[in-house]
Amino acid sequence: MFAREHRACRKESRRCQCNEFGHTAKLNAPAGLVVQNVRATKYNTDGAQQWLATYNSPANSTDTGFEVGLDSEGNVYVSGSRTGPDASLDYVLVKYSQ
């Protein structure tokens, strides 16, 4: 995976990745807001948004995205954490396919 600046990556992004095929994915976290869910956006090679996905844990609690990545097929992976139903901290890995 390659990390580089891309026009889709703006300063409100927590993390941004671009692969060798020009696909870009970023985690979104609006400045000054407490984020309860993880939002990921995928852009094509022209910088046009392809989709926006939101992860909300089953406990409907606070979810945090730490890293985003892309594979050679354009699948997006988001790693992070969520607060479980018993208030424990759990790790989470989400895969978004094309």
Image (spheres, grey):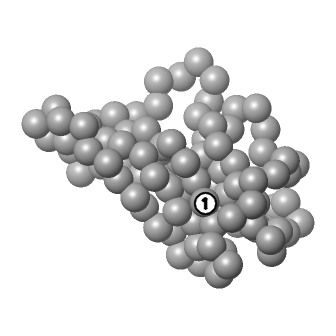
**What residue lies at 64% left-to-right and 55% top-to-bottom?**
41
Q: Is residue 22 left or right of residue 75?
A: right
Mark yes or no: residue 49 visible: no
Mark yes or no: residue 11 visible: yes
- The part of the image, by quadrant, that contains residue 70 is bottom right
Question: Element type at marker 1?
Answer: strand
**What residue lies at 59% left-to-right and 34% top-to-bottom?**
29
- The part of the image, by quadrant, that contains residue 89 is top left
Q: Is residue 28 left or right of residue 6?
A: left
Residue 18 in picture, x, y percent from top left: 76, 60
**What residue lies at 70% left-to-right and 55% top-to-bottom?**
17
The vertical placement of 6 against 88, above or below, is below
Query: Which residue is label 1 attached to?
Result: 69
**What residue lies at 60% left-to-right and 46% top-to-bottom?**
27
Q: Is residue 55 left or right of residue 48?
A: left
Residue 32 in picture, x, y percent from top left: 59, 18
Q: Quadrant of the N terminus?
A: bottom right
The vertical placement of 98 against 94, above or below, is below
- The part of the image, by quadrant, that contains residue 43 is bottom right
Q: Residue furthest top?
A: 32
Residue 80 in picture, x, y percent from top left: 42, 46
Q: Residue furthest left?
A: 86
Q: Quadrant of the C terminus?
A: bottom right
Q: Within 10 angstroms of label 1, few (less than 14), some, or many (20 or more) residues?
A: many
The type of residue carrying mark 1 is Gly
Q: Nearer the viewer, residue 21 or 98?
A: 21
The vertical placement of 41 against 11, above or below, is below
Residue 63 in picture, x, y percent from top left: 38, 39
Q: Nearer the viewer, residue 14 or 98?
A: 14
The vertical placement of 23 against 54, above or below, is below
